[in-house]
Image: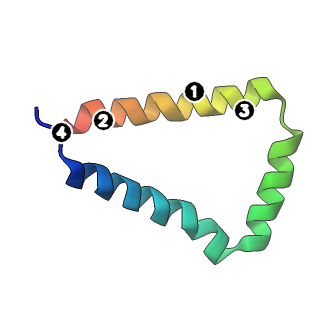
């Protein structure tokens, strides 16, 4: 399997689009979400992050 720079750039572009949607559509809700995140314990945030990483890895394997 050869490395494809175009695929990497497409993935980064999609990430930027998805990351930009919330501040564009509802900046006040994003601020509220950040305030709520600050209240969560570190362990909960780590668990959320781990679940996201695992979901991403599974998606990569399923689409390959």
Give the number of marks. Answer: 4
Residue highlighted by disc 3:
45
45 and 11: which one is in front?
Answer: 11
Q: Which mark is residue 3?
A: 4
**Viewport quadrant of the C terminus:** top left
User: Is residue 23 shown above or below 35?
Assistant: below
Residue highlighted by disc 2:
60
Nearest-to-viewer mark from 4 and 3: 4
Precedes in sequence: disc 4 or disc 1: 4
Precedes in sequence: disc 1 or disc 3: 3
Asked if labels 1 and 4 touch by Cβ distance under 8 angstroms, the answer is no
Q: CA distance from mark 4 to mark 1?
A: 26 Å
Residue highlighted by disc 1:
50
Which residue occupies 79% across, 53% down? Answer: 34
Give how far across and how far down residue 55 sits, in percent.
Answer: 45, 33
Determine the residue located farthest toward the left in the rendered image.
1
């Amino acid at each position: 399997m050869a490395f494809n720079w175009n695929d990497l750039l497409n993935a980064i572009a999609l990430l930027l689009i998805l990351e930009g949607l919330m501040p564009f559509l509802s900046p006040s809700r994003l601020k509220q979400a950040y305030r709520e995140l600050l209240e969560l314990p570190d362990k909960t945030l780590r668990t959320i992050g781990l679940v996201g990483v695992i979901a991403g890895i599974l998606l990569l394997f399923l689409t390959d």
